[in-house]
Image (tube, rainbow, N blue to C red):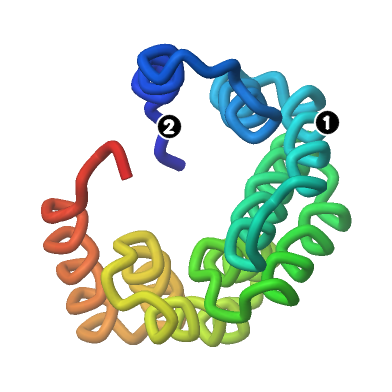
Amino acid sequence: MAKFDVGGLVAAWRRRGQALGPFERGVIALDAGDHEAAVRELSAALASAPSPAERARIHNKCGVAFVALGRRGDALEAFALALDCDDTCAPALVNIGNLLLEDGHALDALDYYEAAVRADETYPLAHRNRGIALRRLGRRSEAVRALRSADRLAGRRDPRA
């Protein structure tokens, strides 16, 4: 999983002369590996999230922290909450697919990866993980195309995004 640009995030907030809020502190804790603190801060950030899309983003990041803590049930619930807020939240769709793929359910995982691609066709991780699932299902030519799409898209994305 890609690391967040924590240094850039902190620098941007300092330039603006503002204190870090719970979301920013949660992202920093997540990147630093302090997953308990990340869950606390991100949970606090939900209270002030201005939109369903922002709440989805926060729930998804909570789910990532729960996965790191080995709390897969809580992670799945957080990803589902993200989708309740925004059913096109591609990262949450990919993360549910990841849980399914890890449990050996490649065909079910593929459904989530394909939904993520439909939700955001420019999200490289959706294409990459779709390719991995296709490869596990023995669909090699489709897998190669998906992985090439992921590589092409990853080269176009701003690493700070």
Alpha carbon of mark 1 to alpha carbon of mark 2: how far? 19 Å
Q: Which residue is drawn at 86% across and 53% down?
A: 74
Residue 15, labelled with which disc? none
Give x and y (percent) for residue 65.
71, 38
User: Would you call the spot at circle 1 few (<14 residues within 10 Å), some (14-19), or many (20 or more)?
Assistant: some
Q: Identify the residue at image location x=73%, y=38%.
A: 42
Q: Quadrant location of residue 148?
A: bottom left
Which residue is rendered at x = 50% and y = 82% of the image?
Answer: 110
Image quadrant in which you'd find residue 14:
top left
Determine the residue positioned at 77% across, 43% down: 66
Element type at mark 2: loop
| Residue 104 at x, y percent in the picture | 65, 70
> Dot 2 surroundings within 10 Å: few (below 14), some, or many (20 or more)?
few
Q: Closest to the observer: 142 or 78?
A: 78
Q: How many marks?
A: 2
Q: Tell me the SS state at disc 1.
A: helix
Tell me the kind of residue under disc 2.
Lys
Dot 1 or dot 2: first in sequence order is: 2
Task: Return the mark for residue 3.
Answer: 2
Q: Which residue is labeled 1 in the image? A: 40
Determine whether, in the image, residue 141 is placed left or right of residue 118. Answer: left
Q: Give how far across and how far down residue 57 sits, in percent.
A: 60, 55
Question: Residue 78's image quarter?
Answer: bottom right
Q: In which quarter of the image is the C terminus?
A: top left
Residue 109 in the image, given as x and y percentages of width and height: 58, 77
Horizontal side, residue 115 vs residue 108: left or right: left
Residues 49 and 160: in front is: 49
Tell me: residue 111, above or below residue 60.
below
